[in-house]
Image: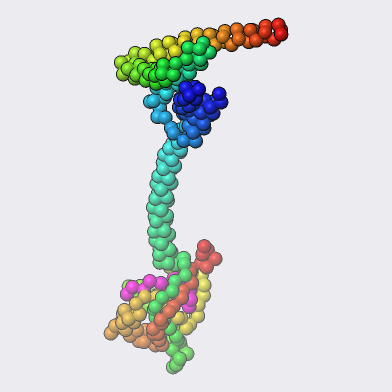
Amino acid sequence: MKKPKNNRVILSFICFIFGMMLAFSYQYTKKEAAKRNVTDRQWQKEYEYRQQLIQIQKENRKLKNELVQKQNEVTEMENALANQQKAHTNLAKQAEKLRMYVGESKVKGKGIEVTLSDASYIPSEQSATDYIVHEQHVFKVIHELLISGAEAIAINGQRISHRSYIVCNGPVIEVDGTQHAAPFIISAIGNPDVLISALNIAGGITDQLVQDNITVKIDRKEEIVLDPIFPVHRP
Amino acid sequence: MWLPLIGLLVGFTVGFLADLRVPDEYSNYLSIAILAAFDTLIGGLRAHLQQTYDEIVFITGFFFNIILATTLTFLGVHLGVDLYLAAVFAFGVRLFQNIAVIRRLLLTEWMERRQNREKS
């Protein structure tokens, strides 16, 4: 009776070990199966996705290269444009300056005003012409002013250009077709000191004008504004 | 009678709960050991039914078969020859033979019982 019981215990122990081994193996197999299953199911998908990713990255790289190229182009174009603009601005500035000289645009600056008036006292009727301002007086003043560096000149507010003409027309003088009567105010933009001293040189213009019985008044002006010759054409 | 079965269940549960992972490279050994153990158990059952059961033979057979099968596998792995196939083959054949014997024994017993019942 003792033997079978012992027998059972040992058998149970062996069964216990066997059960444990079975459990290990089962677990291992399950794990392995799960792993393989996962790979089986997802390998294809993973491969697909990877392929897609590679494709997209390739495309991205290509696009990026293109972008860089385009940006370079844009920069180049911008540079060219900037250069052009610079050239344009220079040209515009130059044109503006030239226009100022030619008299097509309004100018403003320091200068002087020379007023030539007829003599206030006329001794006799016959020699009246000796006491009024003639166009050559105006010429002289204008020439002297130009020689001494005046940049813009106007008579009674009318700009004088290199093509202007001044003619005697009886009691008045005509400047570019517009008649002006005395007193003549000749405005000149330039360095006032230089202009005034040029006019006041001993034996110079002022002296000659005074000799011709003309009242000369020279004013220094801080700001003179001269209109263009053809205000209408001013852009 | 139920003690071995309970032992089997307890062992299974403990093995499950222990959460002991077998490394990949030892999985071959484990499977072959299980085969050996299973063969021995079936052999023991047959011996029990044939009234020739010997405890010492059973226990030594159990462990010796496991160790032998594992060793064979180990050798096979290191020699590059699939020696574990020999173990699988031997155990598998014996397993089938033993199960056939057990089936025949049980069948005979059952037939005898039925005949006895019909007689009585």
* B47 on left or right of B61: right
Count of numbered circles in the view: 0
Q: Residue at x 36, y 87 (%)?
A: A210
Q: Residue at x 30, y 15 (%)?
A: B79
* The one of A83 and A67 positioned closer to us in this rendering: A67
Q: Is residue B13 above or below residue A92?
A: above
Instruction: Tell me, yes or no, whether the highlighted magenta stretch contains residue A156.
Output: yes
Q: How is the image coloured?
A: rainbow
Residue furthest to the front in view is A1
Q: Residue at x 42, y 50 (%)?
A: A78
Instruction: Tell me, yes or no, whether the highlighted magenta stretch contains residue B33.
Output: no
* The one of B29 and A209 positioned closer to us in this rendering: B29
* The one of A231 and B23 positioned closer to us in this rendering: B23
Q: Is residue A165 visible?
A: no
Q: Quadrant of residue A122?
A: bottom left
Q: Residue at x 41, y 62 (%)?
A: A93
* The one of B14 and A8 positioned closer to us in this rendering: A8
Q: Position of residue A214 (x, y in %)?
A: 40, 86
**Which range is magenta?**
A148-160
Q: Position of residue B109 (x, y in %)?
A: 60, 9
Q: Quadrant of residue B88?
A: top left
Q: Position of residue A64 (x, y in %)?
A: 43, 40
Q: Position of residue A194 (x, y in %)?
A: 31, 79
